[in-house]
């Protein structure tokens, strides 16, 4: 594939991605599940297509991150304790692969800023955990997931403070969006009644859409930097 054709194909899929994203947000706003079941899993799928076309490395862990994101998106659509339980499992596996991929790309040189950034985030998420009514079957998964979220935040914040590069800026943006997404999901699932989901779900999907696109750009930017 020529460079110009490749560039046009990538731009086309970026446009398709954001059109699909807009449809997903609108579908969430009116709770149209027939559309949601199509548009929601398309978000990670389209990013896999974009990554496959644009990547010089094609790291299999990126595909695992997106596959488990696809499963999580599907499992979080129904409003039942069983689907929420399996959704949390898928979400946790997704986050594990996310952390593995970030650690493969980002090398921590000084652990003191990392710990200083991780601890406050850990306190925030564990406070929310202790103050909420979490189902017993999800107890340990939520604890582990909060730990993973704090580690993600610590990596992104400490690396950005130590070195304000394009790569670290993209990582910070995507992780902050991921943490905001987790907070919104947490509030929706464990704090507020179903009636409030009409406002929170479009917000969650907006954060999800931009977080994953920023993550895709971070991975591509890192690969090109290492390739050059």
Image (spheres, rainbow, N blue to C red):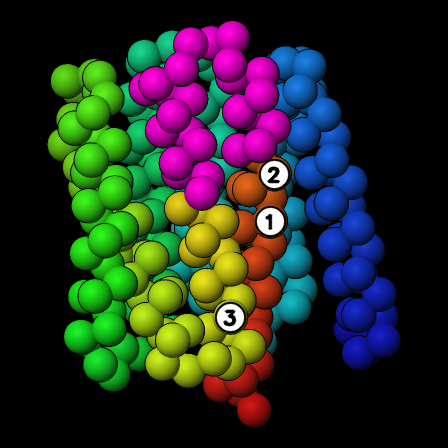
Which mark, residue 206? Answer: 2
Q: Report the residue at 40% width, 46% height from top.
A: 179
Q: From this view, report whether residue 209 is shown above or below residue 224.
A: above
Q: Report the residue at 46% width, 73% height from top.
A: 168
From the image, tell me which residue sits under label 1. Answer: 210
Q: Is residue 84 left or right of residue 23?
A: left
Q: Are marks 1 and 3 in contact (CB under 8 Å)?
A: no
User: Which quadrant, please, contains the N terminus?
Assistant: bottom right
Q: Are marks 3 and 2 in contact (CB under 8 Å)?
A: no
Q: Report the residue at 40% width, 15% height from top.
A: 192
Q: Is residue 154 visible?
A: yes
How far apart are the two marked residues, 3 and 2, measured between alpha carbons? 19 Å
Q: From this view, report whether residue 132 is shown above or below residue 176.
A: above
Q: Give the percent coordinates (x, y) of residue 75.
A: 43, 24
Magenta-drawn stretch contains 61: no
From the image, tell me which residue sits under label 3. Answer: 169
Magenta-drawn stretch contains 197: yes
How far apart are the two marked residues, 1 and 2, measured between alpha carbons? 6 Å
Q: Is residue 223 visible?
A: no
Label 2's element? helix
User: Looking at the image, is mark 3 or mark 2 earlier in the sequence?
Assistant: 3
Which mark, residue 75? Answer: none
Tell me where the magenta segment starts and ends, as one range: 180-204
Residue in the foreground of this view, choosing between 99 and 207: 207
Q: Quadrant of residue 132?
A: top left
Q: Give the percent coordinates (x, y) of residue 154.
A: 29, 62
């Amino acid at each position: 594939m020529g460079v110009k054709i490749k560039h046009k194909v990538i731009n086309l899929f970026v446009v398709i991605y954001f059109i699909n994203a807009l449809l997903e947000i609108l579908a969430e706003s009116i709770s149209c599940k027939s559309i949601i079941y199509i548009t929601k899993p398309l978000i990670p799928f389209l990013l896999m297509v974009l990554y496959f076309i644009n990547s010089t490395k094609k790291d299999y862990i990126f595909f695992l991150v997106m596959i488990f994101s696809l499963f999580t998106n599907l499992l979080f659509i129904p409003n039942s304790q069983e689907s929420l339980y399996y959704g949390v499992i898928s979400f946790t596996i997704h986050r594990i692969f996310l952390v593995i991929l970030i650690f493969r790309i980002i090398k921590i040189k000084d652990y003191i800023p990392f710990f200083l950034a991780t601890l406050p985030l850990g306190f925030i998420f564990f406070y929310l955990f202790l103050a909420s009514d979490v189902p017993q079957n999800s107890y340990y998964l939520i604890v582990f997931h909060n730990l993973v979220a704090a580690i993600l935040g610590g990596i992104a914040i400490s690396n950005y403070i130590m070195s304000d590069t394009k790569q670290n800026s993209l990582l910070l943006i995507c992780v902050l969006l991921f943490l905001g997404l987790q907070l919104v999901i947490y509030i929706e699932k464990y704090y507020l009644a179903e009636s409030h989901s009409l406002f929170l779900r479009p917000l969650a999907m907006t954060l999800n859409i931009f977080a994953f696109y920023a993550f895709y750009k971070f991975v591509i930017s890192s690969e090109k930097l290492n390739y050059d």
